[in-house]
Image: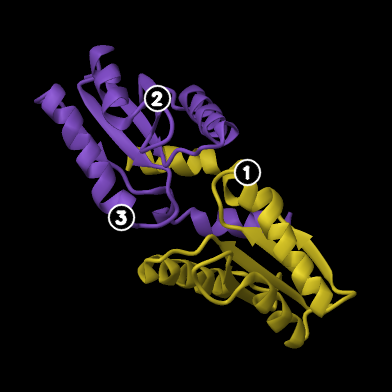
Chain colours: A yellow, B purple
């Protein structure tokens, strides 16, 4: 089954911040290898594409399984409530697709060594 | 010379998010080993301690070199302008101390494999 990854950022009024996310996700797409056939960025607000639009788009490209990864540092309302609600909107438009909500960036065990390495450099 | 690390988060109205940062920083303190004698959290807004208060506190504990690490995902106004301005406030109160502004979390090359591992798990 074709797998897709949608990385969800908050979205910013500052377009350079949205572009920084899109560039990170483009690099992620290059690194994803065989794990995900398609990797794309989506935004909770203030930037395009929306989460449901991005999910519908990868499904229409052939994905039968979509992983949604919140690019957020803490488990606030956006991660707990708003992103699941956006996923539900996509499921209304494309029922029957498997969608997996991955852990948010700040929940990764790799965040600790990442910060320590940054602090030392 | 005694070195200190101050990890700066945005700060949230949701106290659980601030507490999540404090817990991450406490784990960072345990992992920092010989690199930093003191590791503490600070917040740009909405939570305590402020950046200048945290910097002054570690200096008064004996630090002669302070690394400030922005726990932010993108290089927006907060990282580029607001955090340096808060550092300047600390330097007015404790002149002559060396303060190094580290890269923000989202600038780390380790962010890409972190996200890919989260997406696969």
* Residue on which the image places disc 1: A75
* Residue on which the image places disc 2: B39
Q: Chain of mark 3?
A: B
Reading the chain from its start, which is encountered first: label 2 or label 3? 2
Which residue lies most toward the bottom here?
A61
Query: As displayed, is residue B97 above or below residue A58?
Result: above
Which residue lies most toward the left here?
B96
How far across and how far down the image is residue B83, in percent?
Answer: 28, 43
Which image quadrant for residue A44?
bottom right
Q: Residue at the spot x=74%, y=66% of the render?
A: A87
Which image quadrant for residue A89?
bottom right
Q: Residue at the spot x=35%, y=39% of the render?
A: B69
How far across and how far down the image is residue A2, in percent?
Answer: 79, 79
How far across and how far down the image is residue A101, in percent?
Answer: 74, 58
Left or right placement of residue A12 versus residue A68 in this view: left
The residues tagged by marks 2 and 1 sit, at their Cα atoms, a distance apart of 22 Å
């Amino acid at each position: 089954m074709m797998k897709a990854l949608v990385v969800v950022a908050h979205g910013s009024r500052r377009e350079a911040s949205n572009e920084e996310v899109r560039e990170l996700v483009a690099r992620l797409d290059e690194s994803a290898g065989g794990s995900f056939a398609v990797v794309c960025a989506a935004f909770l607000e203030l930037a395009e594409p929306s989460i449901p639009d991005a999910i519908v788009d990868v499904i229409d490209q052939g994905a039968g399984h979509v992983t949604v990864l919140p690019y957020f540092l803490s488990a606030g309302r956006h991660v707990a409530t708003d992103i699941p609600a956006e996923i539900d909107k996509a499921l209304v438009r494309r029922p029957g697709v498997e969608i997996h909500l991955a852990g948010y960036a700040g929940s990764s065990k790799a965040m600790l060594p990442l910060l320590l390495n940054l602090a030392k450099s």
